[in-house]
Image (cartoon, grey):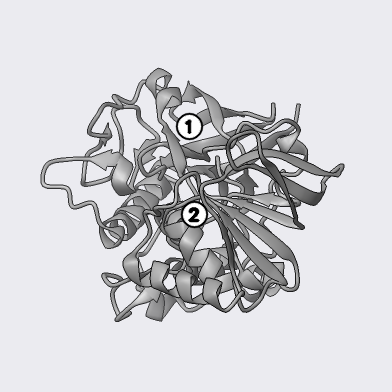
Amino acid sequence: MSICETDVAVIGAGPVGLFAVFALGQVGLSAVVIDALHEAGGQCAALYPEKPIYDIPSRASITGAALIEDLLTQANSYAPDYRLGHRVRSLLGDNGRFDLGLSDGSQVRAGAVLIAAGAGAFGPNRPPLDGLAAYEGHSVFYSVRTASRFRNQHVVIAGGGDSAADWAVQLAGIAASVTVIHRRSAFRAAPATMASIHLLAEENRIAVVAPGVLHGIEGDRSVLHAVLVDQGRGEIRRLPADVLLCFFGLAKDASAMASWQIGAGRDGIPVDPRSCETCRPGIYAIGDIAHYPSKLKLILTGFAEAATAAHAARHRLRPDQAFHFEYSTARGQPTKAAAAGHADPFANIAAT
């Protein structure tokens, strides 16, 4: 069984979890980042990568995807180890030594645990298609990191919400073809986006199959060749496809935390706002999952909690080590050795 040792295990690779990596690095602590999704970014990347966010300090507006890219660049200065596409199945141990069992059978051993899991582990709602797993991550995707990845490919998009509609419009000028499948003729996307889709459809730059339901996929191992669509009354239509993008939302699952003895409930995980520590010493919670009186569930609040938890964890893990607080302007940039290998913010991220 593979065992990875680190100072702090960060559960959650959303914006708050990524900033926590930087905050930990600033106080000299290493981090392993674990997330159930195969891409870093949490809800920002999975649900609204192209939607603007307006409450990030110093940024009049920034898209979810751009925010995550900037946070990855910042976090990767400290060379974290990303374990994406895996859930934490167990959390054993006590103050000073925690063993986290992951869904792939591997194990992370950490001196402290920092939970930045939003509302719990997120996973995509998958369509019930035979053999789907073999194509996931190769030809079938549940989120899009960069549109250029699908340049000159035949793309089929399944879903009727904002994510499906947004990416259909975005990919219309990049992919060789774009076909949108939805079980009803009425979509749930923003009116302005639907207006763009109708215009692109009139120009034959997008095809819309609605009503239509995914029926099956054809391909060779992980390489997709076609998507089968049930249009009702026994009519099955075959759509040539290189890529299938499924946007059926994300399923939340916080059940694993029930056995972690941290008091997780409907409101989240209770923490002491002075340190963000839970009732279990050495385990911290930040971001939307953390709960205390008058808590504001904002990304900027989570950023502040990340810094608070990082300093508390350093004090716990290095009690005998002198530490003089410095502002980043005095501390300077992260070491060149740590940053040198990660000019690409996504370079050291791989689902294992």
Task: Tell me, yes or no, if residue 73 can be seen here.
Answer: yes
Q: Which mark is residue 46?
A: 2
Marks 2/1 in contact by CB < 8 Å: the verdict is: no
The answer to whether any part of residue 25 appears in the image is no
Label 2: element kind: helix
Identity of the residue drawn at 47% across and 45% down: 12
Q: Earlier in the sequence, mark 2 or mark 1?
A: 2
Point out residue 153 in the picture as x, y percentages from the top left corner.
75, 67
**Picture quarter with the C terminus:** top right
Residue holding disc 1: 96
Amino acid carrying label 1: it is Gly
Residue in view at x 42 percent, y 54 percent: 161
Q: Which quadrant, please, contains the N terminus? A: top right
Q: Nearer the viewer, residue 1 or 35?
A: 35
Q: Residue furthest top?
A: 259
* Rendering coords of residue 36 (x, y %): 55, 40
| Image coordinates for residue 304, horizontal then vertical, percent | 29, 59
In this rendering, the answer to whether 77 lies above or below 11 is below
Q: Is residue 88 left or right of residue 55?
A: right
Q: Nearer the viewer, residue 67 or 239?
A: 239
